[in-house]
Structure formats: C-alpha cells, structure tokens
Image: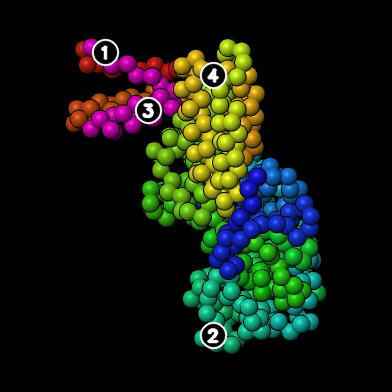
Amino acid sequence: MHEIRFHNTLGGKIEAFAPQNGNEVRMYTCGPTVYDYAHIGNYRTFVFQDILRRFLKLRGFKMKHVMNLTDVDDRIIANSAAAGVSIRDYTEKYAQAFFDDCKTLSIESPEHWIRATDHIDDMVRLIERLQEKTYTYPSEGSIYYRIAKFPHYGRLSNIDVAGIQAGARVDVDRYEKESARDFALWKAPKPGEHFWETPIGKGRPGWHIECSAMAMKYLGETLDIHTGGIDLAFPHHENEIAQSEGATGKTFVRYWMHAEHLLVEGEKMSKSLGNFFTLRDLFAKGYKPSALRFALASVPYRKQLNFTFDGLQQAASSVERLRNFAARLAQRKFPAGKQKGMAARIAEAAEEFDAGLSDDLNTARALAAAFDLLRETNIAMDKGDFRQGDVAAAQEFLANFDRIFAVMEDNDAEKLRALGFGAADSGPSDAEIDKLVADRQAARQRRDFAESDRIRKELAVRGILIEDSKDGSVRWKRK
Ligand code: AMP
Ligand code: ZN
C-alpha cells in the first residue's frame, strides 16, 4: 500500500495524509443549498467527496463525516418570502430531491446528515464566543466579523487584505475576492422575511457561521478534512477559518480539499446558455445513472471536468465493458489451473490502482490500471489462455474497484424507476431514433464517417441496433 498524499489548498502543496486521532477521519463537506434542484456541477463535487470517503474506508479508516444541508441563506430567504411559505416548506422538496439524487448516483450517506435550521442555537453560541473575544461589532441590528482582527485572514485563498478599509462591510453571503470586507455573522430581518428570536437579537445566521458551528459541534475544534467546490474557498471557507479559529484559537482544519468546476462543452453552465443540466434532465434524455457517475468520477478532482455528451456515451460504454467482463468471469467455463504470470499481473494492477488513488485521488490513473488489466485479460480469454484458478483474484480486483467507483451493479433501470422514469428503460422514443438515424444517413452522405460512427455508437449504447440493407435503406430495432 502506498503513502496517501493529498493536495491541501491551505499552502497549495501535496502532503502526506494521516488523521490526528488514530484511525478515525473527521471530515466535513459543505452540502447543497437547497433552494433549487442541484446541477451536475454540484454532483461533480459530491461524487469527488464520495470517492474520497470510499477510498479512506478502503484503506481501513473509520469515517466520521458530516454533510450539512444549507436550508437558510440569502437565496432561500428571498425565494421562500416570495412564495409566501415557511423555509421548511420551501426547502423540503429540494432536500428530498438531493437525497434521491445521491442515492441514484451511489453517493454514500455520511455518518451525519444535518440541517442548518436545526442548529441556530449553536450558531448563536458561536457568535457569542466571538463577541466575547471582540471579533465582532453590531450595525443596524446585524452583527459583523472584523477581519482586521484576524491576522491569518486571506491565507487559504491567497488574498491580500492590506488595502481593505476598516469597517467596510458586505451583507450578501456570496461575493468575489475583490469585495473582501467585514462580513455578516447575523443578519437583521427585512420586512416579510423569516427570523429567529435569540439572545443576540432577532434575525438569521449568515451562511458562513452555519458551517463553522455545525462542523465543530459534531467533529470537535480541529477537523482532519474539509471539502467543497473550489468556488467555496473564498469567501466561505476563508470566513469559516476566521470564525472558528477566532473563537477557539486552534487550527480549524488540517487538510482543505477543493474540487475544480465542471464545465459543459467547455463553457460555464448557465440557464441562459441552455447548457444547464440537473440529473433529471439527463435521465429524461435516456442517460443512465451509472454512466453519469462514471463520467463525473473519471476526471481527477483537481482538473476541470469538461462534460460532453460524447464523454457521457464513452462512460456508458466503459461501464458496459466492466459489467461484461464481470459476467464473463462469472461464467466459470475456463480450463482448470492457473495461467502463468496472471496472478502477478492482477496483483500489479491492484498495486497500481492503489498508487493512483493514493496519489491525490488520481482516478484517471486508477481507471487506467483497471482497464489495462481488463483488456489483457479479455485477450487471454479470447485466446483460451485464461484459467479458472485466476477467476477469484480477478473478481477480488473488481470488487475493490467497485468499492470506489460503484458502477458494476446492473441497477440503472431500478434506480430510474424509483425516480419516476419508468418509461426511460425502454430507451429513446421512436421519433428520437428516427431523427438520429436520419442524421447518421446525412453524415454518411457527406462522408463524415466519424460523425456517422458516433451516432451509431450512441444508438448502440442506448439499446438500438441499426441495420444497413443493400438497397441503401436503414432499419433499426431495439436490443
Ligand atoms: P451550492 O449548493 O451552491 O452551495 O453548491 C454545492 C456544491 O457544489 C459546492 O461545493 C460548490 O462548490 C459546488 N459547485 C457549484 N458549481 C459547481 C460546478 N460547476 N462544478 C463543480 N462543483 C460545483
Ligand atoms: Zn459550508
């Protein structure tokens, strides 16, 4: 087994990883803000933290992992006030959708799922501790954090706070680096907004204090790992450090790990560009949960992930290859005995798989180890060289592989049915297939064989076979 090394955003270096307390890893993940359905970019980050916890478990660590639901922030307050419903009523639907989506993507449940609105008292107490230590000041019913009082402010995200005017404030939860200011810990209510009546006054928590209070409540004052998407490093995590360390005087987090963003066809996702997808959007188009999980997991987390439909199709074929290989192994019709060198080859692949993941969770390297072995073993099987005595070791390799990647079980149809996509297992509609077949014909006519081949593969992945007849017409059928 290899030394585990992770990139720590704080300091910007790759460091050897070991938890502070024996075998237990205390980890906090900023969960979704449940003001809408989460998008595939969000799930890039959630799949990353799932791979991280699965890998740590595979390496024998015991996880104490907390994920929160941000069910109160600027957007939720605004949307629930506009809809005239309580915060709980507004967020419940999206919270439920998030849990369903996680299940569909085989994202494991953390040891603690918690909601911000269940922890208002803890946030108030943390603000009181900061008040006692004079890190705060009030203004018009709100309470602000005085960043000039915290000398390490800016260290995580490398911002220079020298030029910031003392007392300049920012009220919104989310802002850019250029707007670094004293930020709101507690916000006075505006007319019509939901508020809590507390010892520090009427109001609601700022987004940043939520995570500091909840993380420390469940995990103690020093966490091993804190994860999130890269956009959270500033201001959210910078502010979490200022709040937590201001109150305790101790290191808040030992390893900060951030996932780079997902782009769609090279562009930032946005509703106006029409490239904004939720999981449900993709499932409605006939794509499978396992293909999406594979696509999200396959790019190492510190690289931007360029999501494309081509890539999603390739992911679907990779999953298919893995499942076919497992089925081939399970057939048990190989000659008895062991193939010379095969046991060593499987052990070498297992080594390389672990080396990849130990190397700052390099999933691409781990996948290459698996697919190289798959290819070579398939060739050995084709030639009749593979032996029954090597089956168990190959299956064990796959089992370990799947403890991380979790795509082997053929349960996509079942998962889609659970989400209400009953019709999706029958694949694309006739109209959609006719259109693709026509597109393929057009591509062939202009001699764009790469495109026509791509369309044929897309159809194959979605369960449609096409037959070109001699007279030039095309027929298709469902597999
Ligand atoms: P939010 O619900 O906005 O707080 O975001 C939930 C998680 O998704 C956070 O960790 C964000 O950093 C992450 N995130 C947001 N957009 C993207 C994206 N395009 N790619 C990857 N992660 C993202
Ligand atoms: Zn957070």
Three-letter amino acid code at the position of disc 3:
Lys
Q: Residue furthest front?
A: 340
In this figure, which residue is indicated by the disc labeled 2? Answer: 162
Is 421 a magenta residue? Answer: no
In terms of depth relative to the viewer, which is nearer, 346 or 220? 346
Callout 1: 10 Å neighbours few (<14), some, many (20+)?
few
Residue type (three-letter) at the residue carrying disc 1: Ser
Q: Which one is in front in this view, the residue at disc 1 or the one at disc 4?
A: 4
What residue occupies the far left of the structure in this picture?
446
4 or 3: mark nearer the eye: 4
SS for callout 2: loop
> For the residue labelled by badge 1, is the local secondary structure a helix, a strand or a loop?
loop
Q: Which of pointers 3 and 1 lies earlier in the amino acid sequence? A: 3
- Which numbered disc, 2 or 3, marks the residue that appears first in the sequence? 2
Return the mark for residue 386. 4
Mark 1 = which residue?
469
* Residue tagged 3: 457
